[in-house]
Amino acid sequence: MSKPAPRDFRPKLHFTAPSMWLNDPNGLALENGVYHLYYQHYPYDTVWGPMHWGHAVSSDLHHWEHRPIALYPNELGMVFSGSAVVDEKNVSGLGQDGKAPFIAFCTSHGEKEQQSMAWSLDGGNTFTWFSGNPIIGNPDIRDFRDPKVFANPVLGGFSMIVSAQDRAMLYHSDNLKEWKKTGEFGPVPELSQEGFVWECPDLFPLVCNGKEIWVMVLSVVFPAPKGGHHTVYFTGDFDGKTFHRHEDSPMELLDGGPDCYAGSTYWGTQDRIFIAWQACPSYAGEVPTGEYCGQMTLPRIFTLKETPRGVKLSAKPVGLEDQLASGHTAGETLSSETFALRVTGSGAGSVTLCNDEGEEVVFGIDEENCLFVDRSRSTNLHFSQNYEKPELQFYRCPRFETGEWQLDAIFDVSSLELYVDEGTRWMSQLLFPSQPYKKIKFQGKICISLTDFL
């Protein structure tokens, strides 16, 4: 059941369910101009419970229409995370009367985890479970979940990547129903400590300087005290069977903040668009949000950028660039809880958002050329011991660039997203001040422009 919230923390730009629990985004697909967002959902409480797939649609990735629950637990178990494709050529044979089937792939979580599929002929609103489930049985391991299906440009047909404890397993199919294993990626040295568990893998190509490079994204359960959960990425090549990491490709943090997990990219879009669960699983069920619990990050366009430290993934919020570029000079006060700051600087510089209750969040570039955020004094609400752990209060990541910098900060009631150097470094964090931040303070040689979104 929902608990009373100290105040209204529901964001205006970030997606939330109408009520109750939300976690991982699922089944991200574009069909006939409609963006589908499914998500892990427990419709009977604001804490995690038997998983369903909630559903919403949008024409612009910012304004969402809520739809009825799309998938319910069945005899194979709960409906864990997965992906979706639009079978335009009807290779599955599930289409009817010229309608291409919309096919969802998920993990059935029962006594063991295995992969299942369901199909829809009414635009992804209602689904029929495939009679041949599971389409991939469990290979006798505990953690075997989160199937991501994508077109295979080498072999034709489709590939599926599945997290498998300390590695990812890859499969191939010509008809989306019958799958054959083709390879594995991992384990890797950086994630070899006992306790690491891989989740929500994604694999996709991007082009940098005319060269195609594949990106492997993983959400990883990190052993304490290393922060609990992080999303990381590698760059490499895909030979149609498995992913091969570039020898000179270090593991990079996808998001340097605490609240970006279980993300995935869209099927069917021209740009590579990514959405993640904006939360840290260590305290996600304890946030003081009342009737709802959980939100998504802003949708982000991924590209690759050449930097002095090699090719890196870049992220920019979808559809906000014009507003960010047209802001006015910021004063010392804030009139909105949903706004953006574009900060330009040279050398160390910081911005502080604060209120009369002594609560504040500080972010910027430090003396060692690192993007940082300090939320250790961000709230007086003591809602979670895990949220207050010191290792979850201060984050910093070295820039890939040197010299002058531009930092975009998007604040949305209870969310702060930071993007520096064309998005080659970014951070996402949840903040729950007991009263809205109303003041801006700054240090260093910086200029700030402000855009009020609402």
Image (spheres, helix red, strand yellow):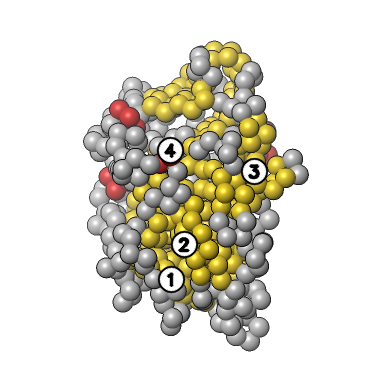
Quadrant including the C terminus = top right
- The residue under the point 33% across, 64% down is 140
Question: Is residue 6 among what the camera can see?
Answer: yes
Q: Earlier in the sequence, mark 4 or mark 3?
A: 4
Q: Given the image, on which type of amino acid does mark 3 rest?
A: Thr
Mark 4 or mark 2: which is in front?
4
Can you identify the residue that label 1 sits on?
136
Quadrant in the rendering for residue 17: bottom left
Mark 4 or mark 3: which is in front?
4
Q: CA distance from mark 2 to mark 3?
A: 23 Å
Q: Earlier in the sequence, mark 4 or mark 2?
A: 2
Q: Given the image, on which type of amino acid does mark 4 rest?
A: Glu
Q: Is residue 304 above or below residue 27?
A: above
Decide if residue 44 is on the left or right side of residue 406: left
Q: Given the image, on which type of amino acid does mark 1 rest?
A: Ile
Can you identify the residue that label 2 sits on?
147
Q: Within 10 angstroms of label 3, few (less than 14), some, or many (20 or more) residues? A: some
Q: Is residue 36 above or below residue 271?
A: below
Can you identify the residue that label 4 sits on?
190
Q: Secondary structure at mark 3?
A: strand
Can you identify the residue that label 3 sits on?
303
Q: Given the image, on which type of amino acid does mark 2 rest?
A: Pro
Which residue is at the front of the view, 245 or 109? 245
- Across and down, in percent, residue 101 comes to 57, 76
Q: CA distance from mark 4 to mark 2?
A: 23 Å
